[in-house]
Amino acid sequence: MMIYGVVIVGIVVLWAGIWFYRHQKLLEERAFLLREAVRNRDFAHRLPVKGLFFGERALQRTVNDLSEDISRLLAQNEVESWQRLTRVLTHEIMNATAPISSISQAYLNHPKIKGSFYEEGIRAIYETSCGLSAFVDSYRKLTSLQEPNLEEVVLCPFVESIRALYPDLEWHLNIDPSVILSLDENMWRQVLINLVKNALEAGATKMDIRWRDGLYVSNNGLPIPADVACEIFVPFFTTKKTGSGIGLSLSRQLMVRQGYMLTLAERPVSGYTVTFMIR
C-alpha cells in the first residue's frame, strides 16, 4: 500500500509539474505577444483570458482595456496631427494659387490675349490653378468637422436604414435589439455609407454587420493587401485611380470625435475578406 501511495503521490507531483510548466510557457508566450505588439505599435490586440487564474484574468483584462485606450489615444493624436498639417498645407497652397488664378483670368479677358498665340497656354494655367484650388478645398473638411450631437440610438433599426439604401447587396445583420449607443446619427451614417461604398468599389456582393464587443462591418470584396493595410487611414493615401484619399481618414476622425475607434481587423469575419471594427 505504501508503494501505491508513493506512486500516486509521484504521479500527482509529476502532473502538477507538467501543468505548472505549461502554464508558465503560456504566460511567457503572452508576454512575448505583448512585447511584439508594443514594438509594432499594434495596440488593438486582445489576448484571451481562458486558462488563467482569477488574478491573472483580471490582469489580462486590464492589459486588454489599456491596449484599447492607448490605441484610441494614438489615433486621436494622429488625427490632430494630420488636421494641423492639412490646415497649414491648404492655407499655403490656397495662398499660392489664388493670385495665379486671378492674374491668368485677367489676362484671358484682355482683348490682346483673346485669339492670340498665348491664349491656350494662359487658359491651361488658369484651369490648372482652379483645379488645384478645388482639390485642396475638398480637404478642408478634414480640419473643419462639426461637433457631434450625441443621442441615445437603438443600433439595429439604424443599421437597417443603411441597408435600405443598397437593396442590390446581400445583407446579413446580427445586432441584438437591446444594443443602444450614444452617437451622432449623421456622422455614423456617413461612416457606414463610406464603408459600403468602398466595399462596392472593391467588387463586394455581400455585407455583414454584427455586434459583439463592438460593431463589425464585413464584405466579400477584394481583400486589402498587408502592405496597404497600415496606410488606409492616412489622409490623401489611396490605391484608386480616381480616389481622393480622404474617405477612411475622415471616417476615423468622425468616430474619434464621438469617442469611438475605427480600425481594420487583422482577421476578417469568417466567410468575408475585409472587416472593419467600430468600438
Image (tube, helix red, strand yellow):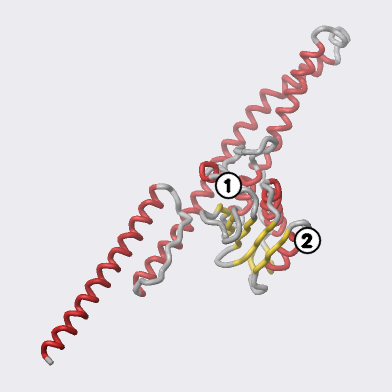
Q: Quadrant of the N terminus?
A: bottom left
Q: Amino acid at mark 1?
A: Ile
The residue that mark 1 highlights is: 224
Query: In the rendered view, does 25 fall on the left or right side of 68?
Result: left
**Residue under the image location 66 percent in, 45 percent down:** 247
Q: Residue furthest bottom?
A: 1
Residue ID at (55%, 42%): 228
Q: Mark 1 near mark 2, Cβ–Cβ under 8 Å?
A: no
For badge 2, the amino acid type reads: Ala
In the rendered view of the protein, which quadrant contains the C terminus? bottom right
Left/right placement of residue 70 relative to residue 95 reads left
Q: Residue at x 35, y 53 (%)?
A: 35
Disc number placed over residue 164 in the picture, else none: 2
Q: Is residue 210 left or right of residue 133?
A: left
Residue 31, numbered label? none
Q: Is residue 35 above or below residue 5?
A: above
Q: Quadrant of residue 211?
A: bottom right
Number of disc labels = 2
Q: At which x and y percent is residue 184?
A: 68, 59
Position in image of residue 16 (x %, y %): 24, 76
Looking at the image, tell me whether mark 1 or mark 2 is earlier in sequence order: 2
Q: Position of residue 126 (x, y in %)?
A: 77, 20
User: Which one is nearer the viewer's eye here, 271 or 61?
Assistant: 271
Q: Residues within 10 Å of mark 1 (few under 14, many from 20)?
A: some
Depth order, front residue of 253/278: 278
Q: Nearer the viewer, mark 1 or mark 2?
A: 1
Residues under labels 1 and 2: Cα distance? 26 Å
- Residue drawn at x 73%, y 23% is 128
Q: SS of the residue at dot 1?
A: loop
